[in-house]
Image (cartoon, rainbow, N blue to C red):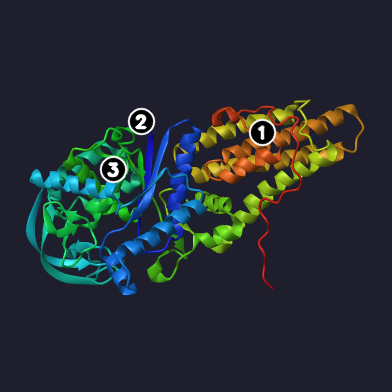
Amino acid sequence: MKNFYITTAIDYANGAPHLGHAYEKVLTDVIARFRRLMGDQVHFLTGIDEHGQKVQQSARQRGIEPIELCDEAAVAFKGLCEKLLISNDDFIRTTEERHTSVVRALLQKLYDDGQIYEAEYTGYYSTRAEQFLQEKDKVNGEWPEIYGEVTEIAEKNYFFKLSEYQDWLIGYLKENENFIVPRYRLKQIQEFLKEPINDLCISRPRERLEWGIELPFDKDYVTYVWFDALVNYISAVGFGTADFEKNWPADFHVIGKDILVPSHGVYWPIMLKACGIPLPKALLVHGWWLKSGQKMSKSTGEVIDPLDLIDQFGVDSFRYFVTREMNVGQDSEFSTELFLSRYNNDLGNDLGNLLNRTLNMTARYVDGTVPSIELEEDTEKELQKSWGETRDEVLRLFEGFQFHQGLEKTFQFIRSINRYAEQRAPWKLAKSEDAKEQSLLKTTLGTMAESLRLASLLLAPVMPEIANKIPRLLGGQESSVSWKESLEWSNTLVGGRVAGKTILFPRPETSG
């Protein structure tokens, strides 16, 4: 059976991890964890792109070899994955032999097939974007800031016959509208394809750039970044071996909207088509994190170090915030105020306080053992019905990558448990010696514990540590049933000993 294969974009080695990197990894991880919990065999790939002019330049400025700089980047990005609890199955580095051999094999095949030719090029070049530009790339007569310094150059290079596949790609996208998720992002590619596209320069002269994969048919040239970097998606899963079909085609490449056009939305499908390789099933395109309406970037000085937030507030809080706040595909605003609002209100007040109330009252009123539900009146039946509706709706939303809405529905249910507690008022029932009210007290505490167990499990793809911790604090044991089965209302907690007071989300320290 084929694995559910999902990838992030690979991060460029010439930079430090930032909020955008962290978000993409968390989003992909949430999908991977959800699919595993739903019973799929998942293969999850991330990694770093290590070749190119900027890496070579940065290494020279520091007086080190490019591979040393890449080794540092690999440590940093692997460290980010570990800190974020990313459950990737593989981490690809484009300097690895398993990658370079595939790149060279594909280039040789295309060259032998007459798909690659040598030609003189005169035109504009952006070092920052590592791509050749045309006049049409200007905005109001100026080069956009994303290109940095643009210079005019003339040199011989090798070109891939990209333009021959333009009509094929236009037709493919028309017939496969679900190739891009969300679908409205498809317009970006279709707009790009309205104008004739140029053939793709796939090389750099070694005299200008040494740090790259040598062309198999000309040792004086190295491979251009996109014909190297994009191939990671197949080289990492054994292209050319019997294992390849276990994973390919990829179910989703998760990428930012800034690398949809032209690299992933035009170059990649055409490269695969030319090589006779099936296309990925879909590209899942997410938006940017903004600060005061502007994209966060190193060049503007607006960057957030995700490791700082994780150190201060915990990894699950960070994962919750970026998943709850971002509607997949659209941009979202980041501010410390927004983060603290989610942390204090959703996590601290709604979830954290509910857990502590449940633990404290169970310890005080029923000797710390989760009681069975002895009575089921309309109030309990209503809560159970609400759970069934919540679970089904959240699973549906998660299936469609609407994680922000799924989390909102989950927390609506968590708030309903708090309302249930207020309605039943176990602190009043505990003072009564009436037998029915004592049964109602046990029922209330048992219902609160079970409802909280269920709600916490629904958070598992997003908040894996919390989802494991809460059932254990409520006296639960390791379950042998599947995740979907564990989301059924049950009595698995009954008789379990609850933990003492636990602060899941400590109040942040305030200065002054």
Rounded to the nearest angstrom, the CA distance separating label 3 from label 2 is 15 Å
Which numbered disc, 3 or 2, marks the residue that appears first in the sequence? 2
In the rendered structure, which amino acid carries the disc numbered 2?
Lys
Closer to the camera in the image, 200 or 399:
200
x and y percentages locating residue 222 in the rendered image:
18, 58
Q: Which mark is residue 2?
A: 2
Residue 59 horizontal/vertical position (percent) = 31, 69
Tell me if residue 429 comes above or below residue 293 in the rendering: above
- Any mark on residue 234, and which? 3
- Position of 33 with respect to 14 (left or right) is right
Residue drawn where x is 38% and y is 41% of the image? 6
| Quarter of the rendering occupied by the N terminus | top left
Q: Secondary structure at mark 2?
A: loop
Query: Are discs 3 and 2 less than 8 Å apart at CB?
Result: no
Q: Residue at 40% of width from left, 68% of height from top?
A: 298
Q: Which residue is mark 1?
A: 477
Q: Is residue 190 visible?
A: no
Q: Residues within 10 Å of mark 1 (few under 14, many from 20)?
A: few
Q: Position of residue 134 (x, y in %)?
A: 17, 63
Which circle's residue, 1 or 2, is located before the other in the chain? 2
Residue 199 position, x and y percent, is 13, 53
Q: Which element carries disc 3, helix, strand or loop?
A: helix
Three-letter amino acid code of the residue under disc 1: Gln
Mark 3: which amino acid? Ile
Q: Is residue 173 above or below residue 142?
A: above
343 versus 431 height, above or below: below
